[in-house]
Image (tube, rainbow, N blue to C red):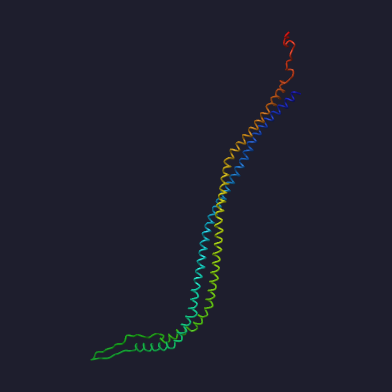
């Protein structure tokens, strides 16, 4: 019975030592696997945070350029609105000149056309007379020939040219007066465009104000992402040290567990080898008793 009990105790001790060794190896591998997974996750986290940070920086630069572009567009819209407002008086003045003064001048010119035609006819006759003037004489046998040096032979007589000018002006005053409605409509359209452009400028100003408020928020986000990235890097650097400490703790636990198996192993070995047999205990004889003091 003692031999069987010894075998059981030895088996328990050996299995405990084997389990402690296996637990030590498995614990180290498990800690390494967890550390590798955490390292991968932390590396991915750092890379993701860096990507987010670069995206925010790019967004900030884009917002800044958009702010500058909207400011330029707003200024341009204001200038266009002012320019259109300044153009309307010029358009009104042009309307007065085109639809009133010029037609009146043309009509006055047309009224003077008959007198002008008579003057043109007289001038034409005079020029032809001067052109035909030629003197040829002989004085003391010396031939003399001279003229006034005037050459006048147009394809269209002067009076006919004046008539053609008068004919070309027929209906022009009415056409110019008919432009007044279109010019007034253009002026009203320009006024509406000026108001719309002014509204666009105000809206752009409001949008620009919102964009200006976004930039400080992006700075705060960038600062937060930077702090998170630094924390992730620091955690990644400290992870290996922490994993080493965990492995040391696992080693200590497994070694302690293995040492606890030494006692049952030793006891089982003694039971198995018979060293724990009761016959090995030498009884005390009467001769070995202490002598009586008396």
In the rendered image, the residue lying farthest to the front is 294
Q: Nearer the viewer, residue 134 or 280?
A: 280
Residue found at the very far top of the displayed protein: 294
Is residue 241 depicted above or below 77 in this figure?
Answer: above
Residue 31: which quarter of the image? top right
Name of the residue lying farthest toward the left:
140
- Residue 95 at x, y percent in the picture: 50, 77
> Residue 138: image x %, image y %?
26, 91
Q: Quadrant of residue 199?
A: bottom right
From what the image shows, is residue 5 above or below residue 159? above
Counting from the top left corner in percent of width and height, residue 148 is at: 31, 86
Relative to 255, is 198 above or below?
Answer: below
Q: Quadrant of the N terminus?
A: top right
| Quadrant assignment for the C terminus | top right
**Where residue 258 appears, x then y in whole percent?**
66, 30
Looking at the image, residue 286 lies above or below residue 26: above
Nearest to the observer: residue 125 or residue 92? 92
Snapshot quadrant of residue 127: bottom left
Pick whichever, 260 or 287, lies toward us: 287
In the rendered picture of this protein, how many numbered marks are placed on residues? 0
């Amino acid at each position: 019975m003692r031999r069987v009990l010894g075998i059981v105790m030895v088996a328990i001790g050996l299995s405990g030592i084997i389990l402690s060794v296996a637990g030590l190896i498995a614990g180290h591998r498990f800690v390494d696997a967890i550390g590798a997974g955490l390292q991968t996750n932390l590396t991915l986290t750092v890379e993701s945070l860096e990507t987010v940070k670069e995206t925010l920086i790019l967004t900030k630069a884009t917002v800044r350029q958009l702010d500058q572009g909207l400011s330029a567009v707003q200024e341009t819209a204001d200038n266009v609105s002012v320019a259109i407002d300044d153009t309307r008086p010029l358009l009104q003045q042009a309307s007065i000149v085109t639809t009133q003064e010029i037609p009146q001048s043309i009509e006055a010119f047309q009224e003077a056309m008959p007198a002008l035609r008579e003057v043109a006819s007289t001038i034409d006759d005079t020029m032809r007379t001067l052109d035909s003037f030629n003197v040829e004489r002989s004085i003391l046998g010396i031939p003399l020939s001279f003229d006034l040096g005037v050459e006048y032979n147009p394809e269209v007589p002067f009076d006919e040219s004046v008539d053609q000018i008068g004919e070309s002006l027929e209906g022009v005053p009415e056409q110019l007066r008919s432009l007044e409605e279109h010019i007034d409509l253009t002026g009203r359209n320009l006024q509406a465009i000026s108001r719309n452009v002014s509204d666009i400028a105000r809206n752009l100003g409001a949008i620009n104000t919102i964009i200006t408020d976004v930039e400080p928020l992006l700075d705060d986000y960038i600062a937060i992402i930077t702090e998170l990235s630094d924390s992730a890097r620091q955690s990644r650097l400290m992870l290996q040290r922490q994993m080493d400490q965990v492995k040391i703790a696992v080693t200590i636990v497994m070694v302690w567990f293995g040492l606890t198996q030494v006692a049952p192993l030793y006891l089982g070995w003694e039971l198995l080898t018979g060293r724990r047999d009761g016959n090995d205990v030498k009884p005390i004889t009467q001769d070995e008793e202490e002598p009586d003091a008396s």
